[in-house]
Image (cartoon, rainbow, N blue to C red):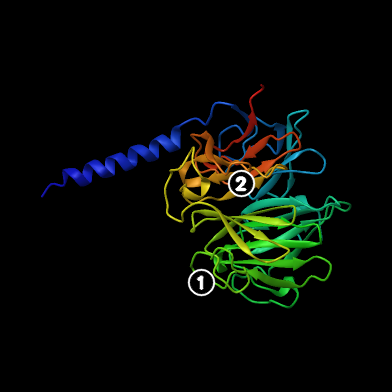
Amino acid sequence: MKYPLVATVVGLMVFHFCLAAFAEPVAAPGWTLTNFAGAGSRQAGPTSGLATQVNIGQPFGAEAGPDGAIYITEVEHHRIWRVDPKTGQAKVVVGTGRKGYSGDGGPALEADLNEPYEVRFDHDGNMYFVERLNHIVRRVDHQTGHVTTIAGTGAQGYSGDGGPATKAQLRQPHSIALDHRGGLYIADIGNHRIRRVDLATGIITTIAGNGERKPPIDGELAAGHAMLGPRALYIRDNIMWIALREGHAVWKLDLSTGRLAHIAGTGRKGYTGDGGPASDGTFNGPKGIVVDPDRNIYVVDTENHAIRRIEARTGKLTTIASGMNRPHGIGLDEQGHLYVGDTNHHRVPCIAPAAQ
């Protein structure tokens, strides 16, 4: 028996996938897009050189450091890169390139990592990064350059609340964020929770989620209520913005009150809503988020291969870049330039407002 309709549908699905896989990224009118780092190959290569000529295999996170450099997590080869925007030079600053879990107490370049997903910095210049498959968060001391584990045991699970974070279990943590009061927040996505580590005491607690795979409830307290797939976190002005991967939505958590508010996405998987209210739009597995000083929100709509913007003043949703290949992390520098881990293109494009 023949199934022409099924064959047609499958063919269209394959065609759509191929378009996503081989399209070149493009910016929407009013925006520019240029390649900032990565030669487009996932193969291992030199650990330093011109940023656009070095291989960065599967870049995920991108973050502006306190020194003005852009730091990029490389999942394929388990490393973290530093790129100087002024010189265009790139070099590996964390990781041997080997998959593993070693190096605590020693130089960051001698540590084995396992899928570093995201990197952040505190006000003292210390670097924090999360390793998905080691189920940990580590820190690189700004003064010594030595690496230590500050959360997680290396084994996946859910345990340890109320005790030392280094004895607590996480399950595939994906994202981290820092507040101004010495708190480190972890998107413990495998446990459908958000955890907080008090960096002064080392104690870990759960601040959002109860482990249930259900959407949050608008206006409810985050503690003790469901949090469906918290994938990416960003903090500004004591507000945490959260991209829900399975929830296909954006929420915010007021860290002063502990209450949640829905910002964008209906909760259904899709790619609709540009030009209208963000709350009525649809996303497909968003995996990155950043907020500028004016509170405009930028969302990495991963499975739609696009970067979308929620305007603070109007709440309107737009696409500012498309044609990527499963982008993940996103960072913002002081000039308002965005840096995106265009993961399966093995590049990090810079997106900026076009000159007026």
Which residue is situated farthest in the left direction here?
A: 1
From the viewer's perspective, tell me whether residue 17 is left or right of residue 350.
Answer: left
What's the distance in space between the residues labelled 2 and 1, CA to CA? 25 Å
Looking at the rendering, in which quadrant would you find the C terminus?
top right
Q: Is residue 101 visible?
A: no
The part of the image, by quadrant, that contains residue 208 is bottom right
Q: In terms of secondary structure, where does tag 2 sit?
A: loop
- Location of residue 38 in the rendering, given as x and y in whole percent from the top left corner: 62, 34
From the viewer's perspective, tell me whether residue 226 is left or right of residue 202.
Answer: left
Q: Nearer the viewer, residue 9 or 95?
A: 9
Residue at which label 1 appears:
212
Which residue is situated farthest in the right direction here?
A: 143
In the rendered structure, are the residues bearing label 2 and label 1 in contact, judged by CB atoms less than 8 Å apart?
A: no
Amino acid type at image mark 2: Gly
Please give the name of the residue rendered at 56% of the width and 36% of the height, measured from the top-left corner.
Answer: 41
Amino acid type at image mark 1: Glu
Q: Nearer the viewer, residue 315 or 104?
A: 315
- Location of residue 15 in the rendering, given as x and y in whole percent from the top left corner: 34, 37
Please give the name of the residue rendered at 57% of the width and 73% of the height, measured from the top-left corner.
Answer: 210
Please give the name of the residue rendered at 73% of the width and 78% of the height, measured from the top-left corner.
Answer: 162
- Location of residue 203 in the rendering, given as x and y in whole percent from the top left corner: 76, 73
Q: In terms of secondary structure, where does tag 1 sit?
A: loop
The part of the image, by quadrant, that contains residue 101 is bottom right
Which residue is situated farthest in the front direction here?
A: 314
Q: Is residue 191 visible?
A: yes
- Location of residue 355 in the rendering, given as x and y in whole percent from the top left corner: 67, 22
Q: Marks 2 and 1: which is nearer the front?
A: 1
Q: Residues within 10 Å of mark 1 (few under 14, many from 20)?
A: some
Q: Earlier in the sequence, mark 2 or mark 1?
A: 1
Vertical position of residue 333 compared to residue 28: above or below: below
Residue at which label 2 appears:
329
